[in-house]
Image (tube, helix red, strand yellow):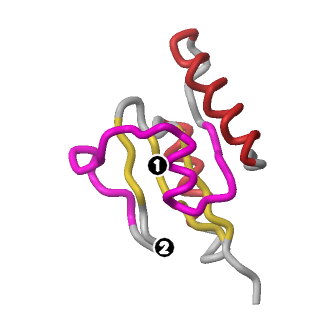
């Protein structure tokens, strides 16, 4: 039996939404374990929808989110603005240190 791939989606703007829609079309072998916005994140159970942002929790360090969710893949859909560069770099380095990045 093939185990599903669990991923964390960092960035939930237009590109993040489009990515999520594409992932959901792939069936149960790809699961979104968490979605991270600018200041908050939502942890998801397999098959659950992304809740309204008002119910999301405080954004945790990416290493903590990856560990809590058991995700093995980090997908970044962050803006290419200078303000987002530091976060994108920090997340990518943390995921690579864990051996997780896509």
Query: Could you say whether the residue bearing mark 2 is in a helix, strand or loop?
Result: loop
Q: Is residue 95 magenta?
A: no
Q: Position of residue 97 (x, y in %)?
A: 75, 40
Q: Position of residue 11 (x, y in %)?
A: 51, 37
Name the residue at 61% across, 57% down: 7
Name the residue at 43% across, 70% down: 45
> With 87 as the anchor, is 54 left or right in this view?
left
Q: Where does the magenta region start and end?
A: 49-76
Q: Quadrant of residue 50?
A: bottom left
Q: Quadrant of the N terminus?
A: bottom right
Q: Is residue 72 magenta?
A: yes
> With 27 as the anchor, is 59 left or right in this view?
left
Q: In the image as oriented, which residue stretches furthest toward the left?
A: 54
Q: Position of residue 82 (x, y in %)?
A: 57, 9
Q: Work out whether residue 79 or residue 101 is closer to the camera in this orientation and state it.
A: 101
Write down the residue under mark 1.
35
Q: Which mark is residue 46?
A: 2
Q: In the image as oriented, which residue stretches furthest toward the bottom?
A: 1
Q: Around disc 2, counting alpha carbons within 10 Å, would you say few (fewer than 14), some (14 to 19), or many (20 or more)?
A: few
Name the residue at 74% across, 45% down: 101
Q: Around disc 1, counting alpha carbons within 10 Å, would you say few (fewer than 14), some (14 to 19), or many (20 or more)?
A: many
Q: Earlier in the sequence, mark 1 or mark 2?
A: 1
Query: Could you say whether the residue bearing mark 1 is in a helix, strand or loop?
Result: strand
Residue 68 higher or lower than 41, as above or below: below
Residue 90 higher or lower than 86, as above or below: below
Q: In the image as oriented, which residue stretches furthest toward the top?
A: 82
Q: Quadrant of residue 22?
A: bottom right
Name the residue at 28% across, 45% down: 53
Q: Work out whether residue 51 or residue 18 is closer to the camera in this orientation and state it.
A: 51
Disc 1 to disc 2, how far (Cα)?
Answer: 13 Å
């Amino acid at each position: 039996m093939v185990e599903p791939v669990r991923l964390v989606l960092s960035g939930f703007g237009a590109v993040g939404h489009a990515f999520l829609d594409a992932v959901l079309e792939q069936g149960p072998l790809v699961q979104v374990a968490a979605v991270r916005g600018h200041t908050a994140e939502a942890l998801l159970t397999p098959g659950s929808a992304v809740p309204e942002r008002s119910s999301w929790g405080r954004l945790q360090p990416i290493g903590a989110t990856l560990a809590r969710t058991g995700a093995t893949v980090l997908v970044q859909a962050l803006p290419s603005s200078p303000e987002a560069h530091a976060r994108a770099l920090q997340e990518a380095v943390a995921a690579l240190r864990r051996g997780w990045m896509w």
